[in-house]
Image: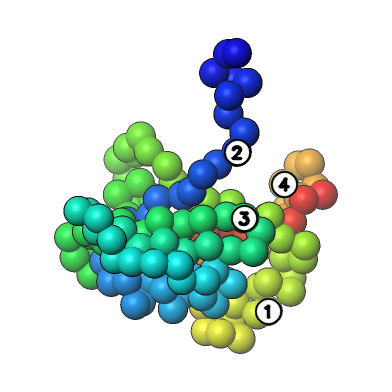
Amino acid sequence: MSISQQISGIAHIGIRVYALERARTFYELLGFNFVIGPIGPEPVAIMSHASGIEINFILNAANDFAENVLMDIPEKHAGYTHIALTVHSVSEVQAALENAGVIISGGPITFSGGSVSIFVRDPDRNVIEFNQPA
């Protein structure tokens, strides 16, 4: 069996954060549930969503409000720039985020294929896209 036939999905998304409680509060707003943590030598905390998405917080960010070197500086570095979550209604998500005091950092943007997205930053400046398919 080839490697491509072996892959069946994404096991989890790793996100480096500074403070567990701050990250946990934000991602609970998005519907993620705390599972366990901190655990392991890094350490790591795990949150899961009813959709099957799992996030592993890597709890070793050096400081509280650092720039996101993949998104916030002119020089472009290789690396993962954001996660994109599929939603049923961008406008409903946007209203709920704004009601919760979350700043929309981009969008709504309608792409050529008809999908619509908005973007936010978590407390550690990691980018999250909410995408409504066409």
Can residue 111 be seen in the rendering of this structure? yes
Up the image or down, 97 lies above or below 72; here it is below
Q: In the rendered structure, which amino acid carries the disc numbered 1?
A: Ala
Q: CA distance from mark 1 to mark 3?
A: 24 Å
User: How far apart are the alpha carbons under marks 2 and 1?
Assistant: 30 Å
Percent from the top left, x then y, of residue 21?
Answer: 34, 77
Residue located at (46% from left, 71% from top): 34
Of circles 2 and 1, the one toward us is 2
| Residue that badge 3 annotates | 52
Task: Single out the mark in the foreground, 1 or 4.
Answer: 1
Residue type at mark 4 is Phe
Lateral position of residue 47 relative to residue 86, left or right: left
- Please state which amino acid type lies under the numbered disc 2: Gly
Q: Secondary structure at mark 3?
A: loop
Which of the two labelled residues, at mark 3 and mark 2, occupies the earlier sequence position?
Answer: 2
Q: Residue 4, position in %: x, y? A: 59, 20
Front-most of 115 and 80? 80
Q: Say the numbered circle drawn on residue 111.
A: 4
User: In the rendered structure, which disc, 2 or 1, sits on the residue that comes first in sequence?
Assistant: 2
Q: Nearer the viewer, mark 3 or mark 4?
A: 3
At horizontal 57% and vertical 55% (from top left) the residue drawn is 53
Asked whether the residues under the numbered discs 1 and 3 touch, taking CB atoms below 8 Å apart as contact, a structural biologist would say no
Closer to the chain start, of discs 1 and 3, is 3
Q: Nearer the viewer, mark 2 or mark 4?
A: 2
- Mark 4 lies on a secondary structure that is loop
The image quarter in which residue 99 lies:
bottom right
Image quarter where the N terminus lies is: top right
Q: Decide: marks 1, 4 in contact (CB < 8 A)?
A: no
Dot 3 surroundings within 10 Å: few (below 14), some, or many (20 or more)? few
Question: 64 or 70, which lies in front?
Answer: 64
* The quadrant where residue 62 appears: bottom left
Report the residue marked by disc 2.
9
